Amino acid sequence: MQGEILFLCVTVFTAGFSIAIGVIFPALGQGKACSQALEGIARQPEATGAISRTLFVGLAMLESLAIYVLVISLILLFANPFVQYVFK
């Protein structure tokens, strides 16, 4: 009983920690990308379309990293593949 409770606590902690760490870096990347895109648009307003398209593709890639972290955390919480080894 103690081992099962410890396993569940560690799983919840790991999922929360992975979300916290896994979202920080894509958020920083998105902020940097938006900042650089706005700077580029300010310097060359005629290139707004090309810069915006490239920015949106890059932001979609960064956002997919955050979604991937969320999926892995949800798997750890609700469909943990290691439960079979703890709860026998």
Image (cartoon, rainbow, N blue to C red):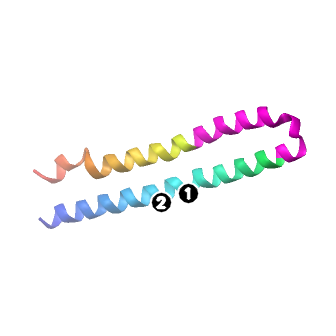
> What's the amino acid at mark 1?
Ile
Counting from the top left corner in percent of width and height, residue 5 is at: 19, 64
Quadrant (top left, top right, bottom left, bottom right) of the N terminus:
bottom left
Element assignment for label 1 = helix
Any magenta on residue 50?
yes
**Residue drawn at 47 percent across, 59 percent down:** 20
**Residue drawn at 44 percent across, 55 percent down:** 19
Q: Are marks 2 and 1 in contact (CB under 8 Å)?
A: yes
User: Main structural element of the magenta stretch: helix, strand or loop?
Assistant: helix
Nearer the observer, 14 or 53 = 53
> What's the amino acid at mark 2?
Ala
**Residue drawn at 71 percent across, 49 percent down:** 34
Nearer the observer, 67 or 25 = 67
| Residue 24 circle label | 1
Left/right of residue 49 with respect to residue 68 in the rendered view: right
Counting from the top left corner in percent of width and height, residue 68 is at: 45, 43
**Region rendered in magenta:** 40-62
Q: Which residue is mark 2?
A: 20
Left/right of residue 38 with respect to residue 57 in the rendered view: right
Any magenta on residue 39?
no
